[in-house]
Image (cartoon, helix red, strand yellow):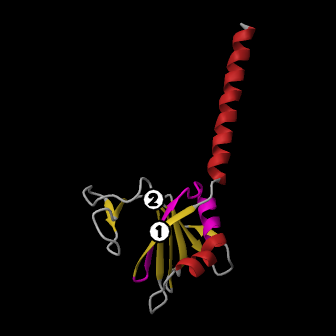
Amino acid sequence: MKRKHTEIIFLLLLFASVLTTYLIWISLRPVSIIAVHQDDDYSSVLVKNFPITEKGEIDWWFKNKDMLKSRYEIPKPSSYGSFTIIFWDYGDGYKEEGKYDRLCFYDMPPPKNCIDKNIVFYVSYSKNSGMYFITNNEKYYLKENGKIVRE
């Protein structure tokens, strides 16, 4: 009986170790920006390995917003200052339009110019609402004092 409990505890510890290692590996993978597509003041950024937590996504934005501006010239605000950047999971890459819920980019030639719609992060700014982030269906606002609050 005691041996069976020892085996169960060992298996649980092994499972916990494997799970912890996997989660650490996922959190340490660098984000890859595959492409940026621009449509007026809307930017679509195709990414792989985006952070999996809400805090990680928002932190990534603040650490990389200057790089996005210098390397990809985004955000590109409208004449009245508003912009939107949507980060999409690149998934299995560009596909043909065929499937129902795909986003197609018309700044590249078909047939493989679409991706499956899978938003991983959303950043927007307007004079009326200020800067806000949408992640996992939660909305966060950047307050004037620099604090981020969930709606």
Tag 1 and tag 2, C-beta contact below 8 Å: yes
The residue at the point 47 percent across, 81 percent down is: 83
Disc ID at residue 90: 2
Q: Report if residue 44 lies within the magenta region.
A: yes
* Three-letter code for the amino acid on which mark 1 is drawn: Ala
Is residue 115 highlighted in magenta?
A: no
Magenta part of the chain: 40-61
Report the quarter where the N terminus lies.
Answer: top right
* Image height of 71 relative to 151, above or below: below
Of 56 and 144, the residue lying toward us = 56
Q: Which residue is mark 1?
A: 35
Q: Mark 2 belongs to which amino acid?
A: Tyr
| Left or right of 115, for residue 90 | right
| 108 relative position to 121: left or right | left
Q: Earlier in the sequence, mark 1 or mark 2?
A: 1
Quadrant containing the C terminus is: bottom right
Residue 36, position as x, y percentages in the image: 46, 72
Give the image location of residue 141, x and y in percent: 57, 72
Q: Residue furthest top?
A: 1
Secondary structure at numbered mark 2? loop
Percent across and percent down for residue 149 are 61, 68
